Image (spheres, rainbow, N blue to C red):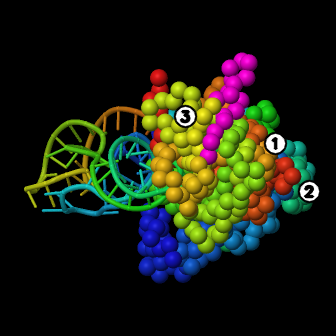
Amino acid sequence: MPADLRDFIRDRIRRDLDGGSAGVVTRFPPEPNGYLHVGHSKSICLNFGVAQEFGGKTYLRYDDTNPEKESEEFVESIQRDVAWLGFDWEGPTFASDYFDELYGFAEQLIERGKAYVCSLTADEIRKTRGTLTEPGTPSPYRDRGIAENLDLFRRMRAGEFADGEHVLRARIDMASPNVNMRDPVLYRIRHATHHRTGDDWCIYPMYDFTHCICDALEGITHSLCTLEFEDHRPLYDWVLDNIAVNFHPPQIEFSRLEVEYVVMSKRLFAALVDGGHVTGWDDPRMPTLAGMRRRGYTPAAIRELCRRIGVTKSENRIEYELLEFCVRRDLERAPRGMAVLDPLRVVLTNFQPDAETLTAAWHPQHPDLGVREMTFSEVLYIDRDDFMETPPPKYRRLTPGGMVRLRYGYIIICDEVVKDASGAIVELRCRYVPESKSGSDTSGLKPKGVIHWVDAETARPASIHLYERLFTEANPNSANYLDVLNPDSLRAMEGWVEPAVVASDQRAFQFERLGYFVKDAVDYAPARPVFNRTVALRDSYKPKVP
RNA sequence: UGGGGCGUCGCCAAGCGGUAAGGCACCGGGUUUUGAUCCCGGCAUGCGCAGGUUCGAAUCCUGCCGCCCCAGCCA
């Protein structure tokens, strides 16, 4: 029972319930015109969250009133993503399910003298709307008779007119200081095929007319939306006040979730994909839920993020570190494994002929996860940056003549550095201490460092993708995004992974000292392992830069 | 400069007239065969600014200042 959440919306709902309201019904209303992104998760967690907490229900409702931008592909991806986040919905329903009712209410508005068919062009409507400081001027069609309006509107529906010839407008106030109230368009003609209703309609209702009515029809008790719709609330209320509907939900606005180094615009997503800067909507660098899923971010981590950021009306931009904290926190319980990204050969000069099998727990704090076995033999790989010929102070890894523990294995001492003609290090010749075996160490040696390794004999080659933020700027936008693209957002390594990880049916692992990794959902195959680094480990090692 | 919102620690965010919660980040320290996890401790005489009311103000009043949103036949 996560009844510990408190914010102005939950407070309001609590008050409504105490005041005798029957229950809680919310809705998550995406337009199926793109993939869901982290920003949406705030709305999802809020809408589904409050319903769960107060014993209500939440509709997944598609706001599909603009056929030219919408498609079945997106309705499917949205359901996949909401389900992945861990929520069950009522429905799904579609605004297009209500096209008949919507049309009826539109005629009702006409009959009541509250709406009229306007035959101005889009351009003329714009020009007569006035400006932010000057009132608009009434359309010459504003006072058309009811019968004529009804006739025209029916003929609009019947397909007698071309796109743009007429629109249905609300008759409110051309001098309103709120430009949204200056006779907003309610219906426009669009001879387009709708992904669900096909060619049944050639007129489509606008958001402002549709949303409030769908909310009312579905009995939404709290219509939660983002801040930019605050100015639309008077129109939301006007529509419901002027039609014969007996339910009037309150619209309550909260601020969007923004994240540093992340763009949330579908337009920009498309530009990134089309420009070849990422591989697709589900590229692990994308802030889409599909991308984050492939990256290895977990639903619990995203829910945790939404819980921690709260719900207010202040605009905010969360630091990426908070998201990463949530991801690490959830992944901490992942089984451990070892992988080497950039191999450096280590030859054990005193190794006995037969390989030895070592046993290691899958998790140091969770013995219930069991153990796995790994071989230890004459030739090993360690990561290149775990060896330095001239180490900085406080370096706790391998150095010439130095000693280090191989995690779960033995202590080794580096006797010789082998270089090629160009002076590059190609191999380390080391000696291991037979009595230093992990768990039964009688050597008395106390090496300062512990490093990871794999057995060259049995390790599996693997592609390992390391990711960094897509942008080098905390606030990328449509104007500068190309200039601030991070050229190193993806580093593809050809490394080695211990075989038990590949054999395991688990997908997410912590490769010790490197971070959390996940088997790529698309490209991974046991014969050709591909891992994505979800997030690196927290690292408090700060070498003094020379 | 019309209308609608928002301003509490680097980033979020409690607080609703009684003398600044918490989280992330950061900085110290402890445990540790992951420089991880975990554990301890530190981190706003100050709440956009200026006045005022009050015994007492982040909370009330007045006036400023700053930021965001709105002029789609998009949502």
Q: Which residue is mark 2?
A: A199
Q: Secondary structure at mark 2?
A: loop
Q: CA–CA distance between discs 2 and 3?
A: 79 Å
Q: Which residue is mark 3?
A: A401
Disc 1 marks a residue whose amino acid type is: Gly
Callout 2 and callout 3 share a chain? yes
The one nearer the camera, A466 or A304, is A466
The one nearer the camera, B56 or A498, is A498
* Residue at point 61%, 52% (across, down): A434
Q: Main secondary structure of the magenta part?
A: strand
Q: Which residue is mark 1?
A: A164
Callout 3 and callout 1 share a chain? yes
Q: CA–CA distance between discs 3 and 1?
A: 82 Å
Graded by Cα atoms within 10 Å as few (under 14), some (14 to 19) or many (20 or more), the crowding at tag 1 reads few
Percent x, y for residue A243?
Answer: 65, 66
Say which of marks 2 and 1 sits in front: 2
Q: Chain letter of disc 1?
A: A
Q: CA–CA distance between discs 2 and 1?
A: 17 Å
Percent x, y for residue A33?
Answer: 76, 50
Graded by Cα atoms within 10 Å as few (under 14), some (14 to 19) or many (20 or more), the crowding at tag 3 reads few
First in residue order: circle 3 vs circle 1? 1
Disc 2 marks a residue whose amino acid type is: Asp
Say left or right for A140 vs A228.
right
Q: Secondary structure at mark 1?
A: loop
Q: Which residues are magenta?
A: A417-432
Say which of marks 2 and 3 sits in front: 3
Graded by Cα atoms within 10 Å as few (under 14), some (14 to 19) or many (20 or more), the crowding at tag 2 reads few
Q: Chain letter of disc 3?
A: A
